[in-house]
Image (spheres, helix red, strand yellow):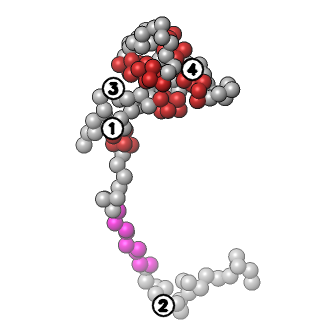
């Protein structure tokens, strides 16, 4: 007889406990102390500005985040000396960020458009200037 046709002996009448219902396995308690904090908590601890998204960087944008990014580009040596590093998004910001992207991706190895992408933004480590999100209970 093959395995598929073999009768199930676990529920045979001569097996002890065959007539009684199966015992329930007790549920494991979930540890509350080891539960990880939500991702929001990790973000509030970061001293760096979170990536605002590519759509954030466009002409006419005035923001302390843009200004903090420009100051970091000056510190990294990618800002042209002819323009001040201000809070208004300009072609100077785009060119400076493109120069920074080029140092991360030499030989045209990726995006060097001058519009910040998440990887380059994280590498630049722009200090947090926006208020940290608060955790609601």
**Badge 4 or badge 3: first in the primary sequence:** 4
Residue at the farthest top position = 82
Which of label 2 and label 3 is nearer to you? Answer: 3
Q: Nearer the viewer, residue 3 or 14?
A: 3
Q: Secondary structure at mark 3?
A: loop
Which of label 4 and label 1 is nearer to you? Answer: 4
With 57 as the anchor, is 137 left or right in this view?
Answer: left
Residue under pointer 2: 16
Q: Residues within 10 Å of mark 2 (few under 14, many from 20)?
A: few
Q: Secondary structure at mark 1?
A: helix
Q: Check the picture and name the quadrant holding the N terminus.
A: bottom right
Res 34 → quadrant: bottom left
**Badge 2 or badge 4: first in the primary sequence:** 2
Q: Secondary structure at mark 4?
A: helix
**Badge 2 or badge 1: first in the primary sequence:** 2
Residue under pointer 4: 99
**Badge 4 or badge 1: first in the primary sequence:** 1
Q: What residue do we see at 45% from left, 19% from top?
A: 74
Q: What residue do we see at 74% from left, 80% from top?
A: 2
């Amino acid at each position: 007889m093959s395995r598929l046709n073999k009768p199930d002996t676990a529920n045979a009448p001569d097996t002890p406990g065959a007539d009684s219902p199966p015992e329930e396995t007790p549920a494991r308690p979930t540890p509350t102390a080891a539960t990880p904090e939500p991702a929001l908590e990790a973000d509030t601890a970061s001293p760096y500005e979170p990536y605002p998204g590519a759509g954030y960087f466009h002409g006419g944008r005035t923001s302390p985040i843009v200004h903090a990014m420009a100051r970091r580009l000056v510190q990294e040596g990618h800002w042209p000396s002819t323009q001040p590093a201000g809070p208004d998004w300009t072609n100077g910001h785009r060119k400076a960020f493109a120069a920074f992207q080029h140092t991360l991706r030499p030989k045209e190895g990726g995006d060097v458009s001058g519009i910040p992408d998440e990887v380059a933004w994280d590498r630049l480590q722009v200090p947090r200037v926006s208020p940290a999100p608060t955790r609601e209970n």
